[in-house]
Image (tube, rainbow, N blue to C red):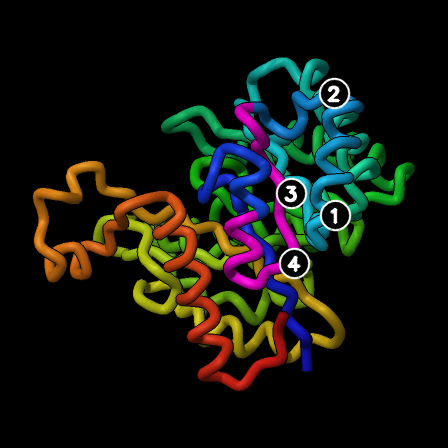
Amino acid sequence: MAKFLLSAFADEASKTLDGQIAALQRNNMKYIEIRNVDGKGILDCTDEELAAIHSKLEAAGIGVSAIGSPIGKIKITDPFEPHIEAFRRALNAAKVLGTKNIRMFSFFIPEGEDAAKYKDEVFRRLEVLVEMAEKEGILCCHENEKEIYGDIDTRSIEICKHFAGRMKGIFDPANYVQCGMHPAEFFDEIYPYLEYMHIKDAMLEDGAVVPSGKGDGHVPELVAKFAKAEGERFLTVEPHLKVFDGLQNLQGEELKHRYSYASSDEAFDAAVAAIKEILNAGGYDYQ
């Protein structure tokens, strides 16, 4: 049975590192999937800034579960060479911040075109990135994202099987739901290739992101299956919940129905509370 380690994209609580640390600490979380800090993407931070970030996180007792990079989030028709340089920065960030995982993607496919047309180029580029990561002892973790090559189950599984552990998967239920899919229908097939999960839920009806367990992502069921793994496994909270600017114009009942929140901090706390409710109800071991 797995022991779950809770992590989060804390930049959804605050733009500042201090605010992100505060959000994690008040929710008793010890890990962050780091993406943006003090107005800069993590790949744009200098070595000095990365060292300062690492020191501050370490002093707060917070580890880095993964680099939440945008690698692979370009069009497959865009030049690849500049992206290789960005990936070098991602590898450096992973080493400085003490994580073996880099979250990445498999390139946007031109709208209206058949993804199969670009398969060879997608895999050529992924192979380059995986080889670079292997030389540094870093693991590429592929996230299913709308409109990239690996957005649907068959192509996500294809990528994972092709790299056979050299690259592993991140399972994001909400992203699959937003592609019109039922994540529980194919989780068993992709499960052996997963490194960790993003905890995010959504509605099939309109793609709206909602607290985990409140949508069509079958999050409690998937967590139960993921719990069968051995050892420590990350669950990374990615809130994406709606912060409503016109809060003062709504009644509390309507707010609850819409899952809208008064602030980024409130939305973050609600997202964390939702997965903790699922974990507590299932009696899972987590921290």
Q: Position of residue 75 (x, y in %)?
A: 53, 23
Going by the image, does 112 lie left or right of 282?
Answer: left
User: SS class of the residue under badge 1?
Assistant: helix
Q: Single out the mark in the foreground, 2 or 3.
A: 2
Locate residue 164: give its quadrant.
bottom right
Alpha carbon of mark 2 to alpha carbon of mark 1: how far? 20 Å
Locate residue 13: give its quadrant.
top left
Amino acid type at circle 4 is: Lys
Q: Earlier in the sequence, mark 2 or mark 1?
A: 2
Amino acid type at circle 3 is: Arg
Locate residue 127: give its quadrant.
top right
Q: Which residue is mark 4?
A: 30
- Which span of residues is magenta-colored? 22-39
Q: Which mark is residue 59?
A: 1
User: In which quadrant of the rendered image does the C terminus lie?
Assistant: bottom right
Q: Are marks 2 and 3 in contact (CB under 8 Å)?
A: no
